[in-house]
Image (cartoon, rainbow, N blue to C red):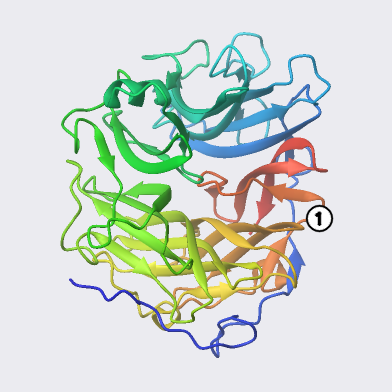
């Protein structure tokens, strides 16, 4: 299928707020209710010793003994006056009641430190654990006086020790691959890694060398080496197949049931306007020529001043592999939350807001974005789409119907929010839904306490 450069047309309404007859105006918020059966009145405050901290992700481990367990990543941010001036990455395990599992780790706290390097700051961004008896894969970055490096590591399921490979410095891996000692690396600013059932790992990596940025999709074996069967000796350089000179920055990846990889982000055009980018790559590292235009779909508004930045992706293996994309739209002044849905071939899903990205302005003067989307676990035939995001002043949770309209029954308003709370930005692991009617979201409280929030839906 060939796709034109401009996939979407927009009608300019209310300062780029796209509305249809069945979509309420944005900017109306209700306060979300905590589930008091979880933790401390609906909150699990994660232990930290620093000046402030963030919970960056939360997942559920499919259990082999019918006792649900959850893993949360977080990090402590020390004061600039701290002698070590470091952030410490942490991993915690807890149960469905919001209690830390003290059998996890070695010191009877339910928490383990996950240092990526002996010096510098360690920050955990993502996590994967296929079940409660398999290794836990973690990723993030470490930075110090000489720059930043992306890291991937694994721990045993019980938190007792690192497993299979010690913290893997992606910069060092690529220095060997490219025979270049000047490369530094960072992960995409979203769900930048995924782990397959066979424990192979895909990662979106952005490298920096003398202020020159390049983007790659790499595949790592379960032993921590590049998989030479993928693309060019384990590395696929991200380039537009038709316009190879435009710089592309990918943020998040996902996969379908066949093992195909989808990666989203944005590209900077010579005009200065950014467009959303979605790529489909086979397990061998080859762009799918039947997807979009030679493997790439562009999200490009016909409004000259409206730019798209894709931050999160979700491929729904229940609803015919439809692709949900979330992020932000920028009108030259502020960012607004954006969500759209595509068919498996990369064409627009015209049943979702008539094939037009839905753009929401949360508050006047705020910078807004959607981070993560999942279909709701509800037991109902028609599942709702849950999306988490944030604005300058705080968090947002939205629930959408199949046609793209907002389900305003959430918190009794268009969207739900919380006061004195923030969700962790740009994260594809920011929430999980353990059961119908409840959602767990990672973030912080009072601006400094790393917290898992249990909310009613």
Q: Which residue is mark 1?
A: 419
Please indicate whether residue 11 sits to the left or right of residue 214 in the image: right
Q: Residues within 10 Å of mark 1 (few under 14, many from 20)?
A: few
Q: Residue at x 64, y 74 (%)?
A: 408
Quick one: 399 or 11, which is closer to the camera?
Answer: 11
User: Residue 446: x, y in percent?
Assistant: 83, 43
Q: Quadrant of residue 64?
A: top left
User: Residue 260: x, y in percent?
Assistant: 24, 48
Q: Quadrant of residue 325?
A: bottom left
Quarter of the C terminus within the rendering: bottom right
User: Residue 19: x, y in percent?
Assistant: 56, 85
Q: Residue at x 21, y 48 (%)?
A: 258
Observer able to see residue 97: no
364 versus 397 height, above or below? below
13 versus 207 height, above or below? below
Please indicate whether residue 409 sits to the left or right of residue 215 in the image: right
Q: Secondary structure at mark 1?
A: loop
Observer able to see residue 371: yes
């Amino acid at each position: 299928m060939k796709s034109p450069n401009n996939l979407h047309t927009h009608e300019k309404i209310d300062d780029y707020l796209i509305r249809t007859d069945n979509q309420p105006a944005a900017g109306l918020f209700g306060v979300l209710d905590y589930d008091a059966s979880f933790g401390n009145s609906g909150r699990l405050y994660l232990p930290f010793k620093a000046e402030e901290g963030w919970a960056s992700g939360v997942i559920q481990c499919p259990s082999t003994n019918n006792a649900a367990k959850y893993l949360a990543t977080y990090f402590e941010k020390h004061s600039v006056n701290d002698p070590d001036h470091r952030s410490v990455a942490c991993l915690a395990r807890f149960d469905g009641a919001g209690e830390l599992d003290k059998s996890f780790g070695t010191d009877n706290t339910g928490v383990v430190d996950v240092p990526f390097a002996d010096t510098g700051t360690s920050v955990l961004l993502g996590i994967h654990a296929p079940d409660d008896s398999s290794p836990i894969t973690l990723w993030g970055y470490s930075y110090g006086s000489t720059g930043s490096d992306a890291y991937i590591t694994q721990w045993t399921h019980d938190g007792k020790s690192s497993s299979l490979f010690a913290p893997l410095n992606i910069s060092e891996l690529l220095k060997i691959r490219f025979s270049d000692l000047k490369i530094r690396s960072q992960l995409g600013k979203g769900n930048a890694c995924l782990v397959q059932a066979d424990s192979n790992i895909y990662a979106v990596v952005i490298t920096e060398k003398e202020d020159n940025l390049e983007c790659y999709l790499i595949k790592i074996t379960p032993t921590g080496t590049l998989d030479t069967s993928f693309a060019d000796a384990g590395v696929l350089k991200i380039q537009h197949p038709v316009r190879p000179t435009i710089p592309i920055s990918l943020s998040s990846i996902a996969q379908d049931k066949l093992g195909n990889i989808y990666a989203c982000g944005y590209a900077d055009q010579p005009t200065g306007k950014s467009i959303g980018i979605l790529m489909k790559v086979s397990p061998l590292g080859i762009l799918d020529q039947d997807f979009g235009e030679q493997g790439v779909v562009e999200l490009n508004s016909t409004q000259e001043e409206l730019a798209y930045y894709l931050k999160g992706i979700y491929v729904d293996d229940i609803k015919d592999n439809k692709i949900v994309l979330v992020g932000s739209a920028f009108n030259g002044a502020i960012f607004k939350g954006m969500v759209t849905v595509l068919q498996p071939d990369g064409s627009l899903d015209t049943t979702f807001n008539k094939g037009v990205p839905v753009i929401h302005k949360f508050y006047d003067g705020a910078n807004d974005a959607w981070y993560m989307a999942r279909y709701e676990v509800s037991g109902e035939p028609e599942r709702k789409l849950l999306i988490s995001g944030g604005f300058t002043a705080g968090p947002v949770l939205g629930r959408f119907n199949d046609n793209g309209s907002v389900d305003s029954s959430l918190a009794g308003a268009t969207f739900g929010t919380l006061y004195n709370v923030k969700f962790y930005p740009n994260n594809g692991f920011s929430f999980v839904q353990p059961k119908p009617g409840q959602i767990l979201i990672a973030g912080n409280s009072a601006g400094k306490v790393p917290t898992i929030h249990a909310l009613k839906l």
